[in-house]
Amino acid sequence: MSKLLRILFLGFLCVAPYLPVSAQIGGDHTYKFLTLSNSARISGLGGNALAVMDNDVTITLANPSLITPEMHNKLALSYVNYMTGNNVGFVMYSRSFSKAGSFVASLQFNDYGTTQGADAAGNKTGEITASEYALTVGWGRTLTDHFSIGANAKLIYSHLDVFNSFGIAVDVAGSYFTKDKLFTASIMARNIGSQIVPYRAGQYESLPFELQLGLSQGLKHLPLRFYLLFTNLQRWDLRYTDSNDPKNQVDPYTGTVDEKSGISKFADNLMRHIVIGGEITIAKVFSIRLGYNYQRRQELKLFERTGLSGFTYGAGFRVKMFDFSFTHATYQAGSPNPNYITIAVNLQEFSKKK
């Protein structure tokens, strides 16, 4: 059985990138809030998903194959003061059953606040509000000493002024891990779904589907773990021409544009699919995290002031049954950048004390 599952898993890894699905490019999809990181730990490592089997309930929203019975009765809360007054929050709770498996329920809310509305002529029309919500129920099961699977089912609601939309989506994932849990590999297909009620009658938009491959490797004699996330495997070309880039300007004397070489274009495109991170844990109670997202850096950096765009850094510490995590993400130099705060508590410990 173990050999068959390994063959199926590796086969899926080989063919998944060639599945005929639409690409994820900014502005092409609705419900983009589903791609936001829900965990300070995930964000601190640069991405929106992780592959590590260490019973962290906060990472299961992105990777349900990591749901385990050891997460039973865990509660987690996350908050992000995203940007320009946007407030993002997550609530997660895990419960395990002997026969049905392990489940994690989560609620995500995005409050975009209130702003002044105006018509096409610039005439003020009054204040408008916007918010979005996703209710998710995830299930996971460990099949063997090396394989686990999981899935999320999502109900999505979006309110943008006078426009409302309702949709459904699922995530599916599978993970391979060694017995010592030092190495983990996960394949994740996220946000497979559809609008049920579009914003405008008859005008259906696609969801931000994404195929991801996550890897992590811990060291045996050092409390250090490295993370590697491959994003947007369903599409190779993620580059675009930025008219503000000085390198894309036409030379006034020759009339030509200084274009990158073929190797440079290939390397640039490859790196846009890669997110890297590292985490060191001291005495099992304090962690320091650093992440780098090349695509985010290229798309959000200021050409005259690059700064730390694309870098994230954070820390986590454990006090008895509580886990606290904080991350600061630098999206653009000189702009308000988001802070992530996550608190997780093992309610099972309260029961033991009583």
Image (cartoon, rainbow, N blue to C red):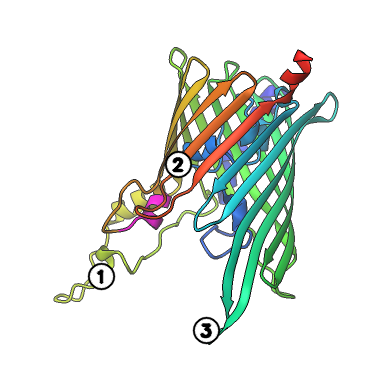
Report x, y in % for residue 191. 66, 51
Residue at image mark 3: 122
Q: Secondary structure at mark 1?
A: loop
| Image quarter of residue 279 | top left
Does the image show residue 214?
Answer: no
Closer to viewer: mark 1 or mark 2: 2
| Amino acid type assigned to the residue bearing label 2 in the image | His
Determine contact: label 1, label 2, CB under 8 Å.
Answer: no
Q: Are marks 2 and 3 in contact (CB under 8 Å)?
A: no
Tag 3 or tag 2, which sits nearer the N-term? 3
Q: Amino acid at mark 3?
A: Gly
- 300 inside magenta stretch: yes
Q: CA distance from mark 2 to mark 3?
A: 36 Å
The residue where tag 2 is placed is 328
Tell me where residue 240 appears, x and y as whole percent: 40, 63
Circle nearer the N terminus (1, 2): 1
Dot 2: element: strand
Other-residue count near label 2 (Cα within 10 Å), few / some / many at <14 / 14–19 / ≥20: many
Identify the amino acid type marked 1: Gln
Q: Secondary structure at mark 3?
A: loop
Q: Residues within 10 Å of mark 1 (few under 14, many from 20)?
A: some
